[in-house]
Every structure is written in C-alpha cells, then in structure tokens.
Image (cartoon, rainbow, N blue to C red):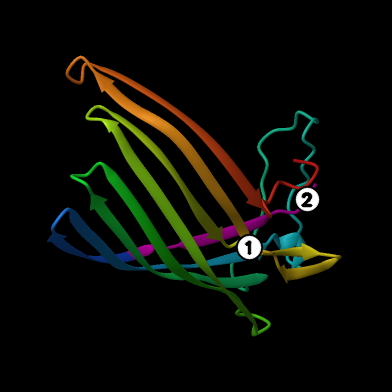
C-alpha cells in the first residue's frame, strides 16, 4: 500500500434539563406531579486529507506490511481537504409524570407521558450538499406499587423508548434515513426487606422488546 488518509474530527455535547415538582395532599391521598424539559445538542465535524500519492505530489514510500522493511514515510497534503463533513444531532424532550399515594402509601399508581422530537443533519462543506431529517415520537409509561406489608411490596409497570439510528445504506441507496430504534419494557416483581433492613429479597421479571436495532455489517 502507498496511500493513507489523515482525519481530524471534533465533537461537542451539551445537555440542559429543567424539572418542576408539584405536591398536593388531601384526605387519604397525596398527589405528586413532575413536569420537565430536556435539550440535547451534539455538533461535530470530520476533515480528511488524502496522502500525497493521491493528489499528484511526490509518491509516498511503499508499505509492505509483511516485508520487514525499515521506518515507513507517508506524505500527506494538508493544503486542501479531500472531505469536510459537518454533523448535527439534536433532541428535545418534554415529559410529565403523575404519582398518587393512596391509603397511607399502601397503593401508589403512576402515569407519565413524554414527547421526543429529534433532528439530525449533515453538511458537506466541499460539495455544499445538505441533508436533514426529523423524527418524533410520543411515549407512555405507567407503574403500580402495592404494599402487602410494611416491608413487602408488589410492583408492576411498563415504559416505551425511542432513539435515532442515523443514516445508512437502505436498498443500495447510501445516506438513507434508518428507521428509529423503538421498544417497550414490562416488568413485575416483589421487593422486601427483613431483619430491620439487614436482609433484602427482591424478585423481578422483565419482558423487553426492541425493534430496528443496528448491528455491525460483515465483515466486522
């Protein structure tokens, strides 16, 4: 081999989250309400320079991985980048969770909803090509806790999840938007503690279903 690419990449990440809690107590119940918003942003860029052998400059020394030759000298042209890709990934999420404590905290139902709005885009600074896509999802979660005794509780619940998979090659077309990852989880179980908290016994069962998980292409 006699060519090499030099890549410089940079990525940043910022996350802003705000929550507000409301509490209200009445006869035989306590109501808790959580309202919140989260903003995530992750800009990035990657710049690549080809080796001199690819841009007409003097040819770099040949590289034979199994030849046992001495030091390898590769010449790379840092004057003009061969590619310059900028990326943007952003997600906004609003959520609300209501929890009610009944009969002296013996029964605790909860219910929550959230709205996820995602945006991802790329910009080729050399070809000036720009692509962008948006995906949105409404998610629901609920739970229920019942205290059989002071130290023994039964619980069950369900929640949904959603995440971007970015872009890839679909039916031979590169740069296509991949279907988002989505899933649902259900659980049921028992929590208990004994001997004044010195011994804990928990049993739980989970049923998790995920769709559109991405896996490495062959060969790995």
Q: Position of residue 164 (x, y in %)?
A: 58, 62
Q: Report the side of 15 relative to 198 (left or right).
A: right
Which of these two is toward me, 178 or 142? 142
Asked which quadrant contains residue 197, the reply is top left
Q: Which residue is mark 1?
A: 180
Whether residue 120 sits left or right of residue 35 in the image: it is: right
Q: Is residue 77 visible?
A: no
In depth, the one of 128 and 210 nearer the eye is: 210
Task: Point out residue 99 in the picture as x, y percentages from the top left corner.
Answer: 29, 56
Q: Mark 2: which secondary structure?
A: loop
- Residue linked to disc 2: 2
Tell which circle, 1 or 2, labels the residue nearer the N-terminal end.
Answer: 2
Q: Which residues are magenta?
A: 1-15
Q: Which class describes the residues within 10 Å of circle 2: few (<14), some (14-19), or many (20+)?
A: some
Percent x, y for residue 125? 60, 80
Question: In the image, 92: left or right of 130?
Answer: left
Residue 87's spot in the image, x, y percent?
55, 71
């Amino acid at each position: 081999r006699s060519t090499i690419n030099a890549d410089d990449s940079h990525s940043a990440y910022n996350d802003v989250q705000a929550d507000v809690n409301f509490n209200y107590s009445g006869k035989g119940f306590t109501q808790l309400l959580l309202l919140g918003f989260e903003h995530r942003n992750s800009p990035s860029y990657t710049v690549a320079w080809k080796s001199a052998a690819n841009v007409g400059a003097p040819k770099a020394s040949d590289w034979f991985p199994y030849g046992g030759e001495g030091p390898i000298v590769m010449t790379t042209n840092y004057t003009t980048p061969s590619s310059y890709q900028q990326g943007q990934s952003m997600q906004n999420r609003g959520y609300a969770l209501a929890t009610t404590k009944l009969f002296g905290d013996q029964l605790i139902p909860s219910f929550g909803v959230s709205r996820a709005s995602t945006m991802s885009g790329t910009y080729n600074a050399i070809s000036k090509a720009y692509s962008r896509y948006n995906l949105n999802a409404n998610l629901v979660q609920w739970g229920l806790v019942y205290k059989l005794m002071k130290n023994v509780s039964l619980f069950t619940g369900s929640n949904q999840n959603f995440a971007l998979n970015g872009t890839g090659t679909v039916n031979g077309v590169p740069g296509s938007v991949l279907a988002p990852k989505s899933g649902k989880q259900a659980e049921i179980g028992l929590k208990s503690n004994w001997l004044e908290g010195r011994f804990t016994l928990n049993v739980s069962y989970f049923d998790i279903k995920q769709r559109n998980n991405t896996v490495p292409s062959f060969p790995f």
